[in-house]
Image (cartoon, rainbow, N blue to C red):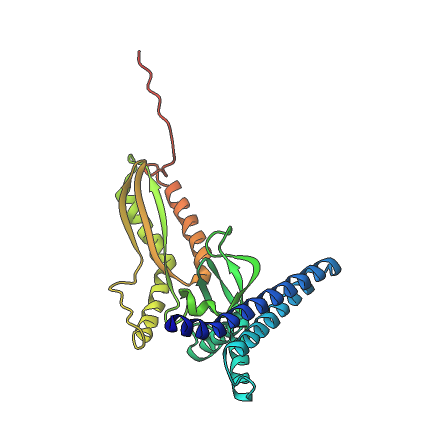
Amino acid sequence: MQTLSSYINISQPVLYKLFLSLVIFIVLTTARYLLNLFILKRIEDHERIYYMRRTFVYIYTVLLVLMIGRVWIKGLESITTFLGLASAGLAIAMHDTVANIAGWVFIISRKPFKVGDRIQITETAGDVIDIRFLQFSVVEIGNWVDSDQSTGRIIHIPNSKVLRDPLANYQIGFEYIWNEIPVLITFESNWKKAKKLLSDIVVKHAEHLSQNAQEQIRRAAEKYFIHYSALTPIVYTSVRDSGVLLTLRYMVDPRQRRSTEQQIWESVLDAFNAEPDISLAYPTTRFYKQD
């Protein structure tokens, strides 16, 4: 009995603190809810509503931490303890802001990209046009537009994403990418002649890019482990259900991908048009008539 009595006496202050903490939580949460209802009824500007609600969240979080902390921690009246809890409350309430500032410091110090670079982070790709304290902005490429062309949209990305998500930079260290153009010809075509024509065309349009890339590789190898055995344009041969696939592979500046692809395709069409024994393959259906 003495042990049980002693347990009850010890637990009463703890139960009182738990009850008081619950009351504080309910009161503050109710006040926050009522304030949100008030601004939704009185204010029609969605931007003002957003910022006011964010402000209420910050105030609510700070008050919750300070008031419940005062219940559980003795000596909170001292300025040191007060400032410590205030800092903790602000850090919790402004978690996203702090993370964005940390991302900005990382971008400025480590320079994973700079204004003018073409990057991709998660599903978003574009050219960086602005780097600010909390976010950076890109002009979007790709999406519904082919060959990495601009869509015209400006996308604002929180700086914190560079700390959490994989980031691809098209231009840092090595400013060229590999591009491939598949050309499908019929089985009846003279594929060896077609491959020779394609080789001549891709060398004509892209060999100078490979020479520039060689120098880029040499400089990039001093900082990164980048190695290619060959950078010259090449044509690969494979077979598909509907014909022989000849794939042109060459190096190109990311911003010139579509223009070089257009030049190559125009040359291919002119060359194949002059050869009666080479035909592009396309889906067809054959019907056989039995006498």
Q: Quadrant of the N terminus?
A: bottom left
Q: Quadrant of residue 283?
A: top left
Name the foreground residue: 120 vs 96.
96
Residue at 44% of width from left, 62% of height from top?
A: 120
Residue 66: image location, x then y, percent: 56, 77
Q: In the image as oriented, which residue stretches furthest toward the left?
A: 229
Q: Residue at x 28, y 36 (%)?
A: 187
Q: Farthest residue to the front: give it.
A: 1
Give the farthest residue toward the top: 291
Q: Position of residue 262 (x, y in %)?
A: 45, 52
Rendered-image quadrant of the C terminus: top left
- 224 vs 264, left or right, is left
On the image, the x and y values in percent for residue 200 come to 32, 53
Q: Is residue 131 visible?
A: no
Res 140 visible: yes
Residue at 38%, 36% (x, y): give it: 282
Q: What is the quadrant of residue 112 in the picture?
A: bottom left
